[in-house]
Image: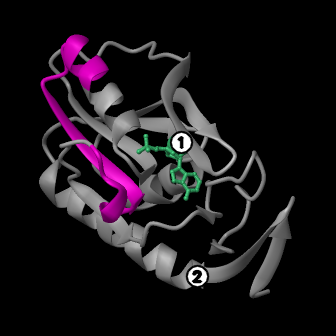
Amino acid sequence: MDAIKIKDKQFTLSITEETIQAAVKRVGEAINKDLADKDPIFICVLNGAFMFAGDLMKTVNIPCEITFIKLSSYVGTYSTGKVHEVMGLNESVVGRNVVVVEDIVDTGITMEKIIASLKAKGAADIKVATFLQKPDALKRDIAVDYVAIKIPNEFIVGYGLDYDGYGRNLKDIYTVVD
Ligand code: IMP
Ligand code: MG
């Protein structure tokens, strides 16, 4: 299935499941090496990162915790720039090595807000693991420690990422056709 339609938009297959799985595995292996004795707490940013986090954590084999927060900033295909916390953090991160697990770093506004909030809550070290990054869209000076795949500045769906709530269940990535 190379072409799909979601609501009013056409999308075409751009990254296959095979490429995705290999890239996610590489991130997990790097994390295993870097954080082996750090007792990290992974914070999966819902909704978009649920599939990435699920696959990533199958490769991560070091002692660790995983928890979830929920944010929303997108309406349709455009970032509103305003990030809302829909579900906050229950666990203490004081003195902890934290790994934020995101679906995509686009402008970086969401990640900047998450990092500031974790610093304020007393995290000792904060690393960022993102499935995708759009380097050309970055508007904030944030350090991204692990990137599975870098993509051009185009709207995509699949593997957790949505267009107006749809497309998150696709196992490949599709790019909008305009
Ligand atoms: P940022 O704050 O601009 O970095 O945007 C971060 C959030 O926007 C991500 O966590 C995604 O949920 C969403 N997002 C950014 N680009 C896309 C895209 O191409 N498709 C679907 N969602 C996206
Ligand atoms: Mg997201």
What residue do we see at 58% from left, 82% from top?
Answer: 14
Reading the image, the residue beneath label 1 is 79
Please say which color scheme the image uses.
one colour
What residue do we see at 49% from left, 26% from top?
Answer: 82
Residue 133 is covered by the magenta coloring: yes
Q: Quadrant of residue 176?
A: bottom right
Q: Quadrant of the N terminus?
A: bottom right
Can you tell me whether the CB of the residue at mark 2 lies under 8 Å from the nearest atom of ligand 1?
no
Reading the image, the residue beneath label 2 is 14
Q: Secondary structure at mark 2?
A: strand
Looking at the picture, does residue 1 appear above or below residue 96? below
Q: 134 or 95: which is nearer to us?
A: 134
What residue do we see at 32% from left, 12% from top?
Answer: 92
Q: 98 or 173: which is nearer to us?
A: 173
Do the numbered discs 1 and 2 sit on residues whose CB atoms are within 8 Å?
no
> x, y (%) of residue 88?
49, 16
Mark 1–mark 2 Cα distance, whole angstroms, equals 21 Å
Where are the magenta residues, as a range?
A: 116-139
Identify residue type, mark 2.
Answer: Ser
Can you tell me whether the CB of the residue at mark 1 lies under 8 Å from the nearest atom of ligand 1?
yes
Q: Given the current orientation, which residue lies at the most extreme bottom position?
A: 2
What residue do we see at 54% from left, 83% from top?
Answer: 18
Crowding around mark 1 (Cα neighbors within 10 Å: few <14, some 14 to 19, many 20+) is some
